[in-house]
Image (cartoon, rainbow, N blue to C red):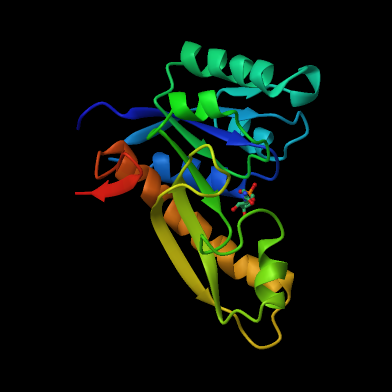
Amino acid sequence: MSKRKRAAILISGRGSNMAALIDAARRYGFPAEISLVLSNRPDAGGLAFAAANGIATAIVDHKAFESRDAFDAAIGKILESTRIEIICLAGFMRVLTDPFVQKWNGRIINIHPSLLPEFKGLDTHARALAAGAKVHGCTVHFVVPELDAGPVILQAEVPVKEGDDEATLGKRVLTEEHRIYPLALKMLAEGKVRLEGDRVVKS
Ligand code: GAR
């Protein structure tokens, strides 16, 4: 097996997608290892799971920085010193600066709880319900400077069922998030998907 890629997961909260990535990366033959979990919030629930699984953790509290540039520079330093090759955003609720995103172009991915380009931003399940959507889902995409706009790597659809509320629909979507995010990381780490300009190329 060729050398495993060193991945960092950036979180802000619960970290269930992070846990799915950690679990997947533990399996034999997975082409990436989770080398770091970094949170911008000291109280992120996911930090404890990462630490309990023997993964290095870092907290970079955005409140301690005067600007986004300074915050991103601090994150960048840590990612460099831990020799990170791929960044997975997993419920990371900070907007990254354009220079940071451009530096990591093609090596930074995100999971979003909707079928992009539908429902960018927050409260995606409530908005899907309000719109009367019959189908909803999640997307793993390359991160580009524009928010929730990057080229799509994988999507999964779920039905919107009669009587669904935000919680029931969100749970159905989350199950799919946990399935496709590890798959997307696997594809990226083994070179089966890459970003060429603004297009996703699969091989
Ligand atoms: C997930 O549903 C993820 O798709 C979403 O936040 C949740 C984090 O949950 N991300 C975004 O909305 C990003 N725009 P988790 O911490 O349990 O993975």
How many marks on residues? Answer: 0
Q: Residue furthest bottom?
A: 162
Q: Quadrant of the N terminus?
A: top left
Taking the spot 24% from the left edge, 45% from the top edge, the residue there is 192
Estimate the x, y position of residue 161 in percent, counting from the top left.
61, 84
Up/down of 83 relative to 112, above or below: above
Do we see residue 116 in this rendering?
yes
Which residue is nearer to you in this view: 16 or 114? Answer: 114
Up/down of 6 relative to 81, above or below: below
Give the quarter of the image for residue 32.
top left
Which residue is nearer to you in this view: 195 or 189? Answer: 195
Do we see residue 36 in this rendering?
no
Estimate the x, y position of residue 150 in percent, counting from the top left.
46, 47
Left or right: 150 as drawn, with respect to 169: left
Taking the spot 61% from the left edge, 56% from the top edge, the residue there is 120
Estimate the x, y position of residue 22 in percent, counting from the top left.
49, 40
Up/down of 89 relative to 134, above or below: above
Left or right: 154 as drawn, with respect to 201: right
Up/down of 21 relative to 42, above or below: below
Taking the spot 51% from the left edge, 49% from the top edge, the residue there is 149
Give the quarter of the image for residue 83.
top left
Give the quarter of the image for residue 39.
top right
Estimate the x, y position of residue 143 in percent, counting from the top left.
48, 40
